[in-house]
Amino acid sequence: MIKAVIFDLYETLITEWVSHKYLSSQCARDLDIDPPLFREIWNSRHRDMDTGHLSYRQVLSQILTAAGKTPDDALMDACEEKRITGKNDCFAAIDENILQMLSALKQQGLKLCLCSNCSADEVEGLLSSSFHPLFDAVILSYQVGLAKPDRQIYLHCAETLSVLPEECLFVGDGGSRELYGAKEAGMHPLRALWFPEKYHTEIAAMPFPAAHTPQDVLAHLNSL
């Protein structure tokens, strides 16, 4: 019996396609750094950001140093502000269908958990968002030092909710191999395709049941 539903955040409950996303290429230009160098260092540090070992600002400082430049506080402040503004746009544009789905799950007596791979700058708008009060638990990777698809973060979610992993439905778009991690942890994975199908031209196949609309989550629960 399913007692809890655990949700991914970006491209599952919110999407960056409705925001003024601050792209790495734009940040590289603002820092006057070669984009391939920026991307190489950024990719190598991303996991450290997700697990709270490095902040966004610290990564910018490392990128500038690697490029032979002295880190400039004002320049990094401007980059960080643009990034946070873009992320906050996502929380200000939550789809009403998402809110209706979450409310319906709550009315059924299910526990709700948010589990996101993120750094602190990516979730500044979370506390003031319209759906934050609906969650019984919020597990953010940078706070707990664990990131999907590490099995331990799923077990941490279940333990926080006081349920067993097999009593959890995990809903996510599939980034970071999160659905594979949920399956390995003993949860029931469900792929959220409402944003990918709307905004992506190509979607990689995955061996999991899919929800094409938020309301499909409710229908899938009835089949378990």
Image (tube, helix red, strand yellow):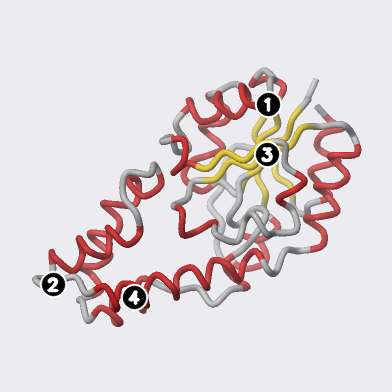
Which residue is at a point 60% across and 61% down the rendered structure image?
A: 125
- Secondary structure beneath dot 3 equals strand
Instruction: Work out which quarter of the rendered image holds the C terminus and state it.
Output: top right
| Mark carried by residue 40 | none
Residue situated in front as seen by the camera: 69 or 201: 69
Kindly report which numbered mark, 1 or 3, lies closer to the viewer in this rendering.
1
Answer with the quarter of the image where residue 187 lies.
top right
Query: Residue farthest to the front?
Result: 73
**Distance Cα–Cα, label 1 vs label 3:** 19 Å
Type of the residue with mark 4: Cys
| Mark carried by residue 190 | 3
- Secondary structure beneath dot 2 equals loop
Q: Which of the marked residues, 2 or 1, is nearer the chain's N terminus? A: 2
- The residue under label 4 is 27
- Secondary structure beneath dot 1 equals helix
Answer with the quarter of the image where residue 168 lies.
top right
Relative placement, left or right, of 119 versus 125 is: left
**Distance Cα–Cα, label 2 vs label 3:** 46 Å
- The residue under label 1 is 161
Mark 1 and mark 3 residues within 8 Å of each other at the beta carbon: no
